[in-house]
Image (cartoon, rainbow, N blue to C red):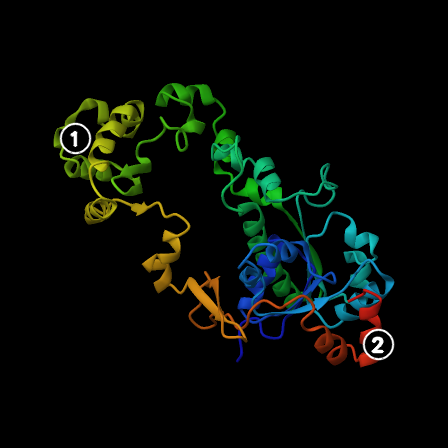
Amino acid sequence: MTMALSGIKVLDLSMFLSGPRASQLLADFGAEVLKIEPPGGETMRLWMNLIPDQADSMSHWHRSKKGLTLEIRTPEGQEILKRLVGHYDVLIENLAPGTMEKCGLGYDALRELNPRLIYCSISGFGKDAPLSHRVAFDIIAQATGGIMAAQGLEHRSPGAFFGDLVSGAYAAIGILIALRWRDLTGQGQQIDISMQDVMYFHNFRAMQNRMHENLDAVTAAIGGAFEDLFTADDGLPFWRPYRAKDGYIAVVFMTDRQWLDMCDLIGRPELKTDPRFADFATRIKHRDLVKEEVKAWMECRSAAEIEAALDGKRIPCGRVLNTHAVNEDINLKTRGMIAELTAEDGRTIPVPGIPLKLSASPGTIRSRGPEAGEHNHEVLSGLLGMTDEEIEALKNKGVI
């Protein structure tokens, strides 16, 4: 079956979440991805193997890939990787800064072997910057990109790995751009993804602070700190979750039309002519009153009842779904996002579906994630022409 990325071959030396998310997106659309990890498996695999029923979760990030074990800190491992590079279009790595260079596998060395190679590096703080030397994880990226503070989470860890997974998605975008550039010029290039960069790029609150030179004037106009409007308990009543009898409902009623409809909905039509709520600015100043009115209506009704009423008035809303409920969501199921794989032994492996829906060249989930080194013989023998004796010798030396 021809797919959009059929014929593109990717070496994935990355670990944990960011790099694997990039190569997963490419694999979903037909790229041939070879996941390379140390003998015994990468750290994420070792962690998952310690948790009952979690080993199969590696398929979340490594479905439709092949697996090769390779110790790149050995001369033999470095030589094998250099031989592989000539057969591949893309290399992805997110190892500790300087690791690839120390092994003689940095971009400058590998592009000499394959000038068409697209070499994607994902790190906490990017290349050639004051903090380039630092190792970073998701929480570090969200902290230094301002996302934790923007969400009011300075005091606790984030609940979702946006630093890793969004950076991986941007790496995939960069790779696709670089492939297009190679189509035009015949040349590869290096892609430098900083997780801090990506988090800052998504930090609209920081952009707002830059745009408003006089935040004191803004604070005076709205009766509170601008940066707290979307997250503080006393922030915007028009953009927040409210408690229902059986859960929470997120609701947005920012426009005048939505406000007027909300007044009718909660049985307070007289508020439509109350000067305290005449426009958005005055409603912000009297936000505590607005919040109490809406809260009183919400808390004595079920989530289903509230959703139906708000939807009938075309007021944006949605239930706050926990990790169990979101896996049962009918909209996600209809969109194919609650997907599963069938392993060779017949067991079912739950995986997320593909979020990119293309009418002419859709992605597919073709196989579970590989076991560590599952395709060693296939790659080393079939691609590099090694004999069984050579492969066995590499295994005995701990190279694979």
Q: Which marked residue is nearer to the observer: mark 2 or mark 1?
A: 2
Q: Which of marks 2 and 1 is nearer the N terminus?
A: 1
Name the element at disc 2: helix
| Image spot of residue 169 (x, y percent) | 55, 55
Instruction: Please say whether residue 142 is visible from this viewpoint.
Output: yes
- Residue 112 position by quadrant: bottom right
**Numbered-mark total:** 2
| Image spot of residue 373 (x, y percent) | 70, 68
- Residue 10 position by quadrant: bottom right
Q: Which of 59 and 95 is in front in this view?
A: 59
Number of the label disc, if any, that sits on residue 152: none
Instruction: Please say whether residue 254 is visible from this viewpoint.
Output: no
- Residue 52 higher or lower than 28, as above or below: above
- What's under tag 1, amino acid-wise? Lys
Q: Name the residue under label 1.
A: 272
- Residue 123 higher or lower than 299, as above or below: below
- What's under tag 2, amino acid-wise? Glu
Name the element at disc 1: helix
Number of the label disc, if any, that sits on residue 390: 2
**Whether label 2 touches label 1, CB < 8 Å:** no
Q: Distance between the residues labelled 2 and 1?
A: 82 Å
- Residue 350 higher or lower than 282, as above or below: below
- Residue 337 position by quadrant: bottom left
Dot 1 crowding, Cα within 10 Å, few <14, some 14–19, many 20+: some
Q: Is residue 274 toward the left or the right of residue 191 in the image?
A: left
| Image spot of residue 393 (x, y percent) | 84, 73
Quarter holding the C terminus is bottom right
| Image spot of residue 43 (x, y percent) | 67, 54
Q: Is residue 19 toward the left or the right of residue 355 in the image?
A: right
Q: Is residue 263 toward the left or the right of residue 233 in the image?
A: left
